[in-house]
Image (cartoon, rainbow, N blue to C red):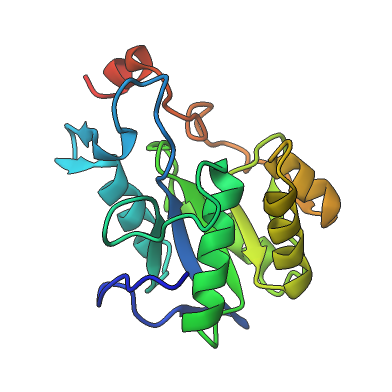
Amino acid sequence: MVVDCGSNYSTPVTLGNTQVVGLVLAGGQSLRMGQDKSKLRLNYKGVSLLEHAKQLLQETGLNSVLVSGSELDQIPDIFPNSGPLGGIHAAFSYVRNNYPHATGLLVIPVDMPNLTSDTLTTLLKTASGANTVVHFKDLNLPMYIPLQRTIFDYLEGALVDGGVLSLYRLFAAVLAKTIPVPSGISHRELDNINYPAQWNDLNQ
C-alpha cells in the first residue's frame, strides 16, 4: 500500500555514503497510558510527543521524516495490529517505492522524549554503510535498518506467518550489529514513557 504523506516529506539526506529516511513509530494502542501517547503535549516545548519526535529526526540531519500510524498523513500498516514490525514493514515498502535513492531507515518510537540528536548521530555514524540492522545493546529502538531485500523478505514472511512478532527475533534473523550505549548520557534518555505516572513525572 502506498500512502501520500504530503509535501513535508521530501528528499532524504545524504549522510556520508548513506541516504537515510527517518521513521517515527506512532501506531501503538497506548493501552497502558490510557490515551494516544503521540498526542500528549510536552509542557516545556509546547508540542506533542509526535511533533517532538519528528523534530528530533530533523535535528539529526534528516530532511525526510515519515510517521507510521493510522492518521491520514501517516503510513498505515499493511498487516494491521502487528506492532513495531508491522509499522517498519509498511514504511520499508513505502520508502522503496517512493524514495529510489534511499538506502536506510532511522527508526525511533514516539514515546522516547528524552532521546537526543547526539545519540542518534552516534547510531548513524556507526551504521553508515552497514549491511544489517544496527541498534544499541539491550535496546530494540532506536535502530538503523538498511533497505535490503533480505530484510524486507524476513519482515514480510514473519507478518504473513503471524506468531511472535518481535524486533529481537528480527535482530537474530539478520545478524544485527549491537553497539554500546554512548557513555555519559542520562540513564533516562532511552526510557519509554508508557504509564501516566511516568508522563506526569516527566511533564511537571
Residue 105: which quarter of the image? bottom right
> Height in image: 192 above or below 130?
above
Q: Position of residue 77 (x, y in %)?
A: 48, 54
Depth order, front residue of 18/10: 10
In front of the other: 17 or 22:
22
Tell me how many marks there are. 0
Is 124 placed left or right of 197 in the picture? right
Give the farthest residue toward the bottom: 100
Q: Tell me the residue at 34%/80% (across/down).
A: 10
User: In the image, 151: left or right of 91?
Assistant: right
Q: Residue at x 31, y 23 (%)?
A: 202
The residue sitting at 47% across, 30% down in the picture is 192
Q: In the shown orientation, is residue 23 left or right of residue 19?
A: left
Vertical arrangement, residue 167 with respect to residue 128, above or below: above
Q: Quadrant of the C terminus?
A: top left
Q: Quadrant of residue 103?
A: bottom right
Counting from the top left corner in percent of width and height, residue 26 is at 40, 45
Residue 145 seen in render: yes
Q: Is residue 20 visible?
A: no
Q: Quadrant of residue 62?
A: bottom left
Q: Residue at x 14, y 40 (%)?
A: 46
| Residue in the foreground of this view, choosing between 97 and 195 | 97
Image height of 35 relative to 104, above or below: above
- Residue 184 in percent (x, y) is at 57, 36
